[in-house]
Image (cartoon, grey):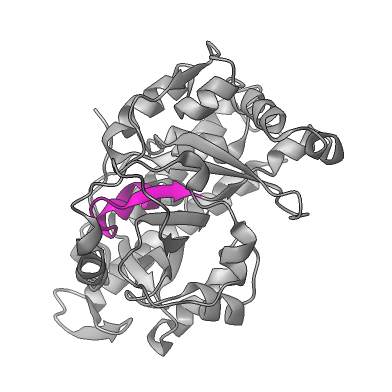
Amino acid sequence: MRLVPSFKVPALPNIAALMPSFGKASQHTTLLGGLDISLTEQAQNTSLFSAYSAAKDSLKALKGQEGVTPEMKSAAMNELTDSAGTVMEARKLVRLTGDDAFASLHGQLPKQEKVHLADESEIVEQRLGSAAQNADCQAFILPTEEGPKLLAQIYRYHLHVPVEENGRVKVENLPGNISGILDADIQDLDGSENVTGYYSISSSLRGAGEMLVVNLDHVTPKGRLETTISPIREFFKSHDKAEILAMSDDEIRGSVLEYLMQEKTKQSPGDGVRNFHVGNGAYPAWIHIDRDNEKDPLIVNYFYDRGNLARNSAFFESGILPMSPELFEIAGNSEKAFAVPEPISVPQSVGAQMTSAISTLSSKVTSWLPSREAA
């Protein structure tokens, strides 16, 4: 069962054969404050990105044309998928900060943001913290001759939630106040953080967003709980907001769960955010209700239990929605649902190590990350 879209990844092209003028160039240029990328690699990446852009344009050009056969569409889609795969092989994972070294990427962030819109200055000031701060942005980039291309970004917020004596965390204590996060100033970490919340994910490349989430364990301290803070906006396309918010809290949660348990089919794909996260192996842990938030009164925590992503994804692909026992009870023990048996808990030996772990992991600005998939 794959955790990410199944793009085919062919071997990288022979750069000397494609661009003989570059040969075996050994010159380097400093890019993004210490990330040293050879001119040859940048030229290779430029070629890969050009091929991807051309494939995307070719597929787009087929739309609306007469005489286009299913075979032609399939061939164009396969070309786009293959070219996206080669670009992803050259991706680099970076922490974007407000430093001037990332200025060329700062301007790309608001253009690509699809969840919580903001201008460049707002993003830089409120979302691009350093390794020692509680808000940050992890991104996939592709260094090219024209400068770095932004492939995907995810905004994260690190915080502390109450923990019981046995290390367990009540699902209702997972973060759900999205307005508070968006309006808050960046703060220094104090070492008590035990949860990382993902509140906005956007991408410009096919499959890049899913792969970014999967690869975040490379830059997340061991033992840190991972959850999304996801507005459920598509729900209100088929449900009257005033009528829903007039219900009791558990009635609202029951209605949302009924919506989320709708089976994904080609004719009716269901909620896009659900498909993204549960397809990646997360599960709904809690549904927060804030009637004072006019834009996003309902927030879903999709919880990422790294040890059980493949199992949860498999249940979802079979038409069964994994969820927390608390939500399973609200859903009436539905046959369309599966109650995950593992409690949400923080390893008790982790707390004191949080600050040093964050600094150590986050000081690595880039990583070569191989493609990963479940067996």
Q: Left or right: where does residue 166 sit relative to residue 324?
A: left
Which residue is at the front of the view, 6 or 155? Answer: 155
Which residue is at the front of the view, 66 or 273? Answer: 273
Locate the N terminus by quadrant. Answer: top left
In the image, what residue occupies the spot 37% across and 35% down? 6
Query: Where is residue 81 shown, x and y percent of the image?
Result: 43, 43
Query: Where is residue 354 shown, x and y percent of the image?
Result: 25, 63
Give the residues drawn in magenta, as a range: 212-228
Is any part of residue 248 visible from this angle?
yes
Q: Left or right: where does residue 289 sit relative to residue 32?
A: right
Q: Is residue 46 above or below residue 342?
A: below
Which residue is at the front of the view, 148 or 140? Answer: 140
The quarter of the displayed image where residue 16 is located: bottom left
Q: Is residue 330 above or below residue 196?
A: above
Is any part of residue 76 visible from this angle?
no
In the image, what residue occupies the spot 46% across and 29% down? 324
Q: Is residue 256 above or below residue 217?
A: above
In the image, what residue occupies the spot 53% across and 34% down? 275
Q: Is residue 304 above or below residue 13?
A: above
Query: Where is residue 32 shown, x and y percent of the image?
Result: 33, 81
User: Is residue 216 within the magenta segment?
Assistant: yes
Locate the C terminus by quadrant. Answer: top left
Q: How many marks?
A: 0
Point out the residue furthest to the front here: 165
